Amino acid sequence: MTITTGEATMRLLARYGVDTVFGIPGVHTLDFCRGLGEGGAIRHVQARNELGAGFMADGYARSSGRPGVVLTISGPGVTNAATSLGQAFADSVPLLLLSADAQSGSLGKGWGVLHEVTDLNAVTRPLTALSRCAHRPEDVPELLAQAFSLFASGRPRPVHISVPIDVLETHVEGDWQPVALPGPPAPDPEQIARAAGLLRSARRPVILTGGGAAGADVTAIAERLGAVVIASNAGKGVVRDDHALSLGAATVRPEVQDYLAGADAVLAIGTELSETDSFVPRMEFSGPIIRVDLDARKMNDLYPASVSIIADAAPAIAELMNALSKGAPAEGGAGTVAGLRGRIADGLSSSEAQHMRVLRVLREALPLEAMVMGDACQLVYSGAFQFPVSMPRRWHYAAGYCALGYAFPNAIGAKIANPDVPVVAIAGDGGAMFTIQELVTAAELKQPIPYIIWENGGLKQIQDDMRAGNVPRVGVDGINPDFLGLARAMHCLAVEPDSADGFANAIIEAQSVERPTLILLHENSEWLT
């Protein structure tokens, strides 16, 4: 019995382990939908905008490590979702955008057909590791094999596969099978030995962790070396933030940047040493840099490596630990970390001190295993170095592309991927408006997500930047809606706490109801000043 290419595609995705797709059905995706009915192996989550769908798939993937899948129409479906591709590309997230395309005979001709883009894959190519069109049914399993091979063996980045509607409707045998996926490259023993030699002789070693270090035992090697550990946003929790050697995601702090400049060896694990973690054009390093990364291109970019270990972090760090076991440990960095923590605390601005009060209450109200999905807002910027987490993939602030509006859809996707883990979202009043409609999606899914909106009267970070640069205040003071009323209209709970205890209770109660709770915090509230 034959089935359509669209239905066969869904069956193949299920065989690759996909259990959820996010999107909005359209006339061009009906044959995909044939494989998504009641009782099917894949669940379809209806977003309210393809941007939200993309961010949900991103949240699913970045919180779990498993590929997230977006299913859209061609044209506006793809362009709406394109921002989520940029976010996933910047943050090394395995995201698959599967879209329809116009009829094969019309491609590139500009006939004005429905949802037409004359070259749809050209739109997404700069935002993906692979962007291809399946011109024949047999192209689909080949392209999916390439996509899942990329996710499994290299630096995970998004992929876009488009399928013209006439190809989607074509009948095939449908018994497509997944390929055996390759693994990541193994570490080179010679490079491991060179790295061990440099680290063994270092007196002030520093370890920098990124999201690629999530599966590695970095704590053991840090303790072996007595090395100070500094995380990127994606690397928070790889070593517990409260560990005596950990400074959390504090590269943004000048106190930490000054210390980094004096390190006599830097071990950078699964991090591209991004400007969006430090917010300086270039960090200064005086010692050699040892880089452990799946992406060979990172070895000689802005921060050239003295030793290049192109491999998955977990086996590379295990082998490096074995190589170091024969030498004497370096001087401990715990005293250094304690001193830097004190200097950071003393150097907080009044706004950062206020943020600290909020974040302390939030930390105490959440279980240790809770995930925080943060949008681009000042409360989250402070949380990078002030909110402690105890394990990887528990703090998610997509600093790379830094698109607004991702936090709450990210939380929806993360909750689906990790149903037994508490998930909370934090956004500013400006960022919240980009995807506020997805409150309806979470309510429909009965998700107990606390959604904290930090209301500070507009785009506060840009206001501050304009003030500092003597720039006229333009376009940063728009009025806000009635957030509480808006949330209730979308079948959610809503509360505005007037004390620290009220805030804590709101967080605790929001985790026990079958719908989201919007928690509105005003920057100028009396209990926060």
Image (cartoon, rainbow, N blue to C red):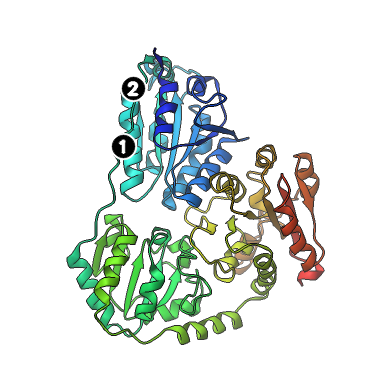
- Position of residue 28 relative to residue 195, above or below, is above
In this figure, what is the number of numbered marks?
2
Crowding at dot 1, Cα within 10 Å, few <14 / some 14-19 / many 20+, comes out as some
Q: Position of residue 436 (x, y in %)?
A: 67, 44
Tell me which label, 1 or 2, sits earlier in the chain: 2
Give the residue at x 52% y 20%: 30
Q: Are marks 1 and 2 in contact (CB under 8 Å)?
A: no
Q: Position of residue 292 (x, y in %)?
A: 31, 63
Q: Is residue 153 left or right of residue 110?
A: left
Task: Let me know if residue 293 appears in the view.
Answer: yes
Name, please, the residue furthest toward the left: 190
Q: Secondary structure at mark 2?
A: loop
Nearer-the-camera pick, 111 or 25: 25
Nearer-the-camera pick, 47 or 390: 390
Q: Position of residue 427 (x, y in %)?
A: 64, 55
- Tell me the mark number nearer the camera, choosing from 1 and 2: 1
Give the residue at x 65% y 60%: 472
Q: Secondary structure at mark 1?
A: helix
Give the position of the N terminus as an image quadrant: top left
Instruction: Return the residue at label 1.
Output: 146
Instruction: Return the residue at label 2.
Output: 135
Q: Check disc 2 and give the amino acid type.
A: His
Residue 454 occupies quadrant:
bottom right
- Position of residue 239 relative to residue 81, above or below, is below
Q: Check disc 1 and give the amino acid type.
A: Gln
